[in-house]
Image: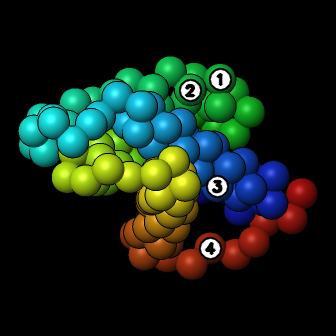
Amino acid sequence: MDQRIYFVVGDVLVNVAIALLVALVSYWLVSTNWNMLFAMWLMMFVGMVLAMLFALPAGILFGAMEVMLPMKLSGMLSGMVVGMWAAMQPITLAQAIGAGGTTGLISIVLVWFLNTRIRGIQAMVKY
């Protein structure tokens, strides 16, 4: 993963943005009369599809492979968390946005951490 500030900020922004979008979709679609397992599965699928659609234009700006995996993970996790939460109890829009944004931020940090563990610490490249 590129460590230049443009790509780092871009990765964080697109991951949080897709997680927020999926959280909003989950908030609007899922109600308390849904089955939790069905809500989790369906919102996970919706999150992956939305992330794939938005990964195509984001990949042009920030690199296709560097954006695709974290965005799909962010969308999937955000859909699962907010979808299951909305199926369990009524949630507010602020709670859905908070959970989605937090999920997106956690997933990109997790991907960056695991990538660093696998590849090892790399020297900063100056361009």
Does residue 115 appear in this view?
no
Q: Residues within 10 Å of mark 3 (few under 14, many from 20)?
A: some
List x then y, in percent, for residue 9.
74, 56
**Nearer to me, 122 or 105:** 105
Give the Cα distance between marks 3 and 1.
Answer: 15 Å
Relative to residue 78, is residue 40 drawn left or right?
left
SS category of the residue bearing label 4: loop
The x and y percentages for residue 87 are 22, 45
Circle 4 is placed at which residue position?
Answer: 122
Q: Is residue 9 left or right of residue 99?
A: right
Q: What amino acid type should be assigned to the residue bearing mark 3? A: Val
Earlier sequence position, callout 2 versus callout 4: 2
Where disc 2 sits, the SS reads helix
* Residue located beneath label 3 in the image: 12
Residue in the image at 45% along x and 26% along y: 50
- Write the residue at 38% across / 52% down: 91
Mark number, residue 54: 2
Residue 36 x/y as whole percent? 13, 45
Residue at numbered disc 1: 57
Q: Residues within 10 Å of mark 4 (few under 14, many from 20)?
A: few
Q: CA distance from mark 1 to mark 2?
A: 6 Å
Nearer the viewer's eye, disc 4 or disc 3?
A: 3
Q: CA distance from mark 4 to mark 3?
A: 20 Å
